[in-house]
Image (cartoon, rainbow, N blue to C red):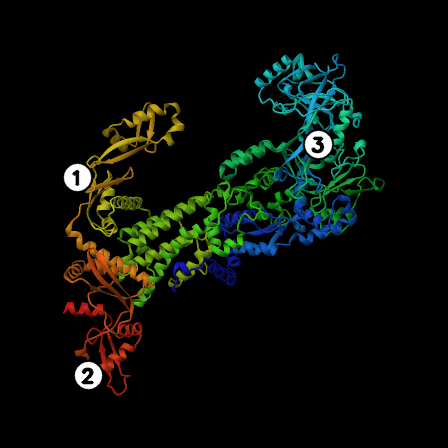
Amino acid sequence: MEEVCEGKDYSFPNQEESVLKFWDEIKAFENQLKRTETMPDFIFYDGPPFATGLPHYGHLLAGTIKDIVTRYQTMIGHHVTRRFGWDCHGLPVEYEIDKKLGIKTRDEVLKMGIDKYNEECRSIVTRYVAEWEKTVTRMGRWIDFKNDYKTMDISYMESVWWVFSQLCEKGLVYRGFKVMPYSTGCKTPLSNFEANSNYKDVPDPEIMASFPIVGDPANAALVAWTTTPWTLPSNLCLCVNAKFVYVKVRDKSSGSVYVVAECRLSQLPSIAKKSKANVPNGTVQPSKEPKAKTKDASKENVKAEAQSGGYEVLEKFVGASLVGIKYVPLFDFFSEFSDVAFRVVADDFVTDDSGTGIVHCAPAFGEEDYRVCIENKIINKGENLIVAVDDDGCFTERVSDFKGRYVKDADKDIINAVKAKGRLVKSQTFTHSYPFCWRSDTPLIYRAVPSWFVAVEKLKEQLLENNKETYWVPDFVKEKRFHNWLENARDWAVSRSRFWGTPLPVWISDDGEEKIVMDSISKLEKLSGVKVTDLHRHNIDHITIPSSRGPEFGVLRRVDDVFDCWFESGSMPYAYIHYPFENVELFENNFPGHFVAEGLDQTRGWFYTLMVLSTALFGKPAFRNLICNGLILAADGKKMSKRLKNYPPPTEVIDDYGADALRLYVINSPVVRAEPLRFKKDGVYGVVKDVFLPWYNAYRFLVQNAKRLEVEGFATFIPMDLISLQASSNVLDQWIYSATESLVQFVCQEMDAYRLYTVVPYLLKFIDNLTNIYVRFNRKRLKGRTGEEDCQRALSTLYHVLLTTCKVMAPFTPFFTEGLYQNMSKVSKGMEESIHYCQFPRAGGKRDERIEQSVARMMTIIDLARNIRERHNKPLKTPLREMIIVHPDSNFLEDIAGKLREYVLEELNVRSLSSCNDPLKFASLRAEPDFSALGKRLGKSMGVVAKEVKAMSQSDILKFENKKEVTVAGHCLQVTDIKVVRDFKRPDGVAEKEMDAAGDGDVLVILDLRPDESLFEAGISREVVNRIQKLRKKASLEPTDIVEVYIESLDDDKSVLQQTLVSQEKYICSALGSPLLPSAAPPHAVILCQERFHGISGLAFAITLAKPALIFNSDACLELYSGDAKQANGLQTYLLSRDHSNLKSEFQQGNGKIKVDCIVNQPSVDVLLGTHVFLTVGEYHLSRRAD
């Protein structure tokens, strides 16, 4: 393995760029697809975005989810085709061209020519494809851009035709009207979720108008309220609620008689506020009275009005009694409907929280209005509906008084016309939230649009059943949001009166008697005799088909409409592979698809259209598994806005911290559970700091110590085989293998359940355990201080654990894991070229749950003991005499007092450890109810249960811990419902400062804090080692850098330090990896760092770090040259001039002997290591001591 730099010098973004180049060189994605061609297919549907804008965080989030799942599926043995798709048609493209060319009306497009307009649209469709490819690739996503699909491809459009033709054959298509949110700025209807994306607070008129009842003896008039006066000329009926109580009242001031809902009487103008409004040509002052919110309140208002003399209640009746009553219309523009229209109908959509309880209905301009008029036979479904407003939002000739006027501009004139007729009861303005077009920023109107419909309501029951067959993450989106949407599904208007889209494949004769639906290009060519090379309007609108009834019936022409782009994207599972014209076997063997993922907004968009079309075509859902993500917001909780610049550009975040960090940040967030995420750049940095740097440091520690073996002359590190390693007797080896197996099992389990958001927290804990338990507690082994064989075993274990972790996390962090894998694979044979060619680690290996639990408890013990030390200001450098572990589990105590004992004692600097399984010897027990767990479940019984739980005796608690449950006040409580608290019971005569304890409800830790002179020298040795380690850092030394450490007492009495160094020699040597030299460095030694310390446990000393220096046996050197001192000095000068590491290697190769024959005028001699020369001062001292 190659050396690696420090974490602070490691650039994650730069490393990722290198990995991208590597993938490109080996054609990693292409080769992965080839290598898996024979494996079972995993079908993933990628929803097509528009390429007319740049990718944002929402796209990157969805792309990351898709990439993680498809990488994982590939690694577990599937062939996953991943083709990028583009939504090419529809309003977003047309709107861009309208802006570019200054087009304002439909006629301007026709004048320009549909061919020129559509080619303009085509020219911008792929405007940002290069930017998309660059950003998506930089995020590490593997997807095929070269073999992408586009909804404007002729093959795609042909499949869309086939889908529509199948629906027609099944009787699921009809032509009718649909009232839809309509943008007069873009001259097109919008889908409901488009209409809901841009609301503004604006002032609008609200008026009450009177509708005299035909033949009423009191000349009473129904009073209706509206906020859209421009719809009044198209009124065809009035609607009441059959269950409400209505009143007939006389205005004592004017004598006018009105009918309104009893609960809304207060909304009529009061006497105090009225002027001439109630007489012909009068004016109305705004009423400032609050609207009644409840029926009880309204009754009080009615009574108050009557008592004040404003209105006289003449009669009360239920709304049902008004049904069928005829009234005098405001205008006569629709007088031909008099036989069926201008009457009262009833429906529950009329509410009592606004208006008068009587709603005016204009079927062409309200969804409920249209439905009510259809249900009450005022108009008929499917017949031509008169829409008195054109595509530009202006009145047609039908409304002759206001012809050519933009509807919103005509409001004032219409109010004045109502007033002139003496029918205006009240007029004022109010501010409310109103929808605007998200593209043109113009106010929307609701308008009936002629459309081709898919009869979704016929499919409702099957849609609900098919939804049950799908698996969603999170499931509440499926069970609530999507289920409710399906339950209230309406027939779907799939056509648009636009230009740039897939044309409807419907040809109709001039008399409307003959209709042909094309299901393929070949059918169109056969019937028309025209060769077809493109299916857009300008290339097929001219094509006619001879009538099958004979020449005298003329020809069939295509209807003008094109498909709603949601119909096209909903056809994606079939159209992207040109089914049924190609890939029949591929589709039919793998439908429904295995996986889709998009944002929460697609529950009413793509997810819905996929489900509707697949149900209509095949009676099945389109997908089996779905991940639904939430919305990414700016840090302030507002929507991300380019204008406000309230978020960092994705490229900036990637350049600063890397794509892997961004991937993990979004995956480890509420957004993958369909909740909103407030994006914070600091959060991405947190992933680098908390996940990647600890992970990298564990990897770097492995590389450093593997290289150290080579430096020290041992064999090049080659990891031992896994089977023999798993038989290790070392407890931490056993633990880390079990923990790694747990990681593999957990990730497999969660990935198979598509719960991506649970993986990162588990990984975080695993890496923390790897670095802070396995690496930390095994430093001596990993650094070779327990022998070469044990070192090889520990390094091999760390190697295999890191390699497995990389494979497990490869789908999540493709760059980082590839970088580590490439270096680690250099020491093993038979490794794959890329980590992404590897199989995912298989779950099912050996797990030791007991040792995992014991180590987890050990870490709890260490944390609790540290807390005790901190409370009593006892730093870890201060040795303590004893600790006692109290726990009822004998297996755990056996592990702690046995194989984990040394780790605990060394980490906590305690001399002895004892255990106790009697929970009452050092603690008294008390039970506390978990209110958060029990509150909702027990309700009013909580108080009684809590009282009895707190009153449980010691023996009751012990029985509960043994049986794991207890019945309290008739309720069965489990271990999760009651917390057992262990309060420390200090021995008699012992003060808190002498002995203290800490517990977590499971284990109790007791520390003996009393001072012990016998531990004084151990404390000094800890201080010395601590100062040396800090000095190494100060000198910027790597852990693998070999230095010699010298210590010199600065006290008059040097015996105290000398005695400590002798008594603590074993600990010091083990901690440093080399002996501490009680002398000054030789004159030729290279000093790296030197520092003096005073007042350390009452001692003063100097520490020197120096490079390893040669020490000569002068007498032995003289003998080599028969007593010639000059020649002996020449040998020493020569050896001192040599590179130390090279000289060491030569001695190793010569088994401790080298021949020196290159000194001028000196004879050749054999120099023996340990006889004539020592490579370090430490070796020299050890040799002298042995002698």
| The C terminus, quarter of image | bottom left
Q: Looking at the image, tell me whether mark 1 or mark 2 is earlier in sequence order.
A: 1
**Residue 906 relative to residue 335: left or right:** left
Label 1 vs label 2, nearer the camera: 1
Amino acid type of disc 2?
Answer: Ala
Front residue of 451 and 928: 928
Q: Residues within 10 Å of mark 3 (few under 14, many from 20)?
A: many
Kindly identify which residue carries mark 1. Answer: 990
**Residue 473 relative to residue 569: left or right:** left
**Residue 384 relative to residue 1142: left or right:** right
Amino acid type of disc 3?
Answer: Phe
| The N terminus, quarter of image | bottom left
For the residues marked 1 and 3, what is the alpha-carbon distance in whole angstroms? Answer: 87 Å
Q: Are marks 1 and 2 in contact (CB under 8 Å)?
A: no
Q: Looking at the image, tell me whether mark 2 or mark 3 is earlier in sequence order.
A: 3
The answer to which image quadrant residue 1163 occupies is: bottom left
**Residue 1041 relative to residue 385: left or right:** left
Kindly identify which residue carries mark 2. Answer: 1125
**Residue 854, relative to residue 367: is it above or below?**
below
The answer to which image quadrant residue 344 occupies is: top right
